[in-house]
């Protein structure tokens, strides 16, 4: 039995010697290329995310479903416009940052700089996701405040409280509650989408970081 084990061990050692061994530079080049590809995809996805609402607006059904009169009736149209400008400005800023991270990683020449580039990219993605989800909550919050300040919300929404055996005040709180729940659910949905898109990519980056850290030591 021991002889058979020894023979198997020698055979395995012989096969192991025949396997190609990657040098430090070859491993670094593989990780560098994978990291560059991941950051490039983060950049592409951020552009698609920025353009998608505008592409949807080209669809007649989507355009008809957008009711801008509602925000004007609530008196929040100027606030929404200011928030939209802020959102676009910051989104463009992050897109530029993603491009810069991609360009930085594409020209790095050593593992230490690549590790730092990966950490910077992950940090930029984290800040972008936090900002995007915060803006979703802020937009819903503005609508809720507008509803609260509207003394004739039932009339604004073309609702008829008498048909539901509720007072206009009760109906206002019900509508605000529904809007708040919708805001939380939509934010959770967006968080799930961001987790699938950016989360998967940043986890790949972190695996590359850990591999670089391992070969550096």
Image: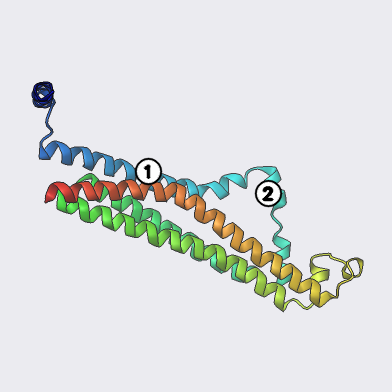
Relative to the observer, which residue lies in front, 111 or 11?
11
In the image, residue 70 above or below residue 170: above
Side (left or right) of 119 relative to 11: right
Residue in view at x 37 percent, y 46 percent: 201
Return the residue at label 2.
Answer: 63
Q: CA distance from mark 1 to mark 2?
A: 29 Å
Q: Position of residue 36 (x, y in %)?
A: 28, 43
Instruction: State the SS at label 2.
Output: helix
Q: Quadrant of the N terminus?
A: top left
Residue in view at x 34 percent, y 49 percent: 203
Q: Position of residue 185 (x, y in %)?
A: 60, 59
Q: Residues within 10 Å of mark 2 (few under 14, many from 20)?
A: few
Q: Quadrant of residue 60?
A: top right
In the image, residue 152 above or below residue 50: below
Side (left or right) of 181 relative to 117: right
Q: Residues within 10 Å of mark 1 (few under 14, many from 20)?
A: some
Instruction: State the SS at label 1.
Output: helix
User: Can residue 152 be seen from the camera position used here?
Assistant: no
Side (left or right) of 214 relative to 3: right
Q: Position of residue 159 (x, y in %)?
A: 84, 65
Residue in view at x 41 percent, y 50 percent: 198
Q: How is the image coloured?
A: rainbow
Return the residue at label 1.
Answer: 41
Relative to the observer, which residue lies in front, 100 or 31?
31
């Amino acid at each position: 039995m021991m002889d058979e084990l020894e023979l198997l061990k020698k055979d395995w050692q012989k096969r192991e010697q025949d396997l190609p061994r990657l040098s430090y530079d070859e491993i670094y080049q593989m990780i560098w290329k994978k990291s560059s590809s991941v950051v490039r995809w983060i950049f592409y996805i951020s552009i698609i995310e920025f353009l998608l609402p505008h592409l949807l607006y080209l669809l007649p059904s989507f355009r008809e479903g957008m009711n801008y009169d509602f925000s004007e009736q609530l008196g929040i149209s100027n606030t929404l416009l200011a928030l939209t400008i802020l959102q676009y400005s910051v989104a463009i800023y992050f897109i530029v940052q993603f491009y810069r991270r991609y360009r930085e990683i594409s020209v790095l020449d050593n593992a230490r700089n690549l590790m730092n580039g990966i950490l910077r990219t992950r940090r930029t993605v984290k800040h972008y996701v936090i900002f995007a989800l915060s803006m979703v909550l802020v937009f819903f919050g503005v609508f809720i405040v507008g509803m609260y300040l509207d003394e004739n919300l039932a009339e604004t929404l073309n609702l008829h409280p008498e048909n539901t055996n509720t007072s206009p005040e009760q109906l206002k709180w019900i509508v605000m509650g529904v809007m708040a729940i919708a805001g939380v659910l939509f934010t959770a949905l967006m968080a799930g989408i961001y987790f699938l898109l950016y989360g998967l990519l940043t986890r790949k980056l972190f695996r590359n970081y850990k591999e670089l850290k391992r070969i550096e030591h």
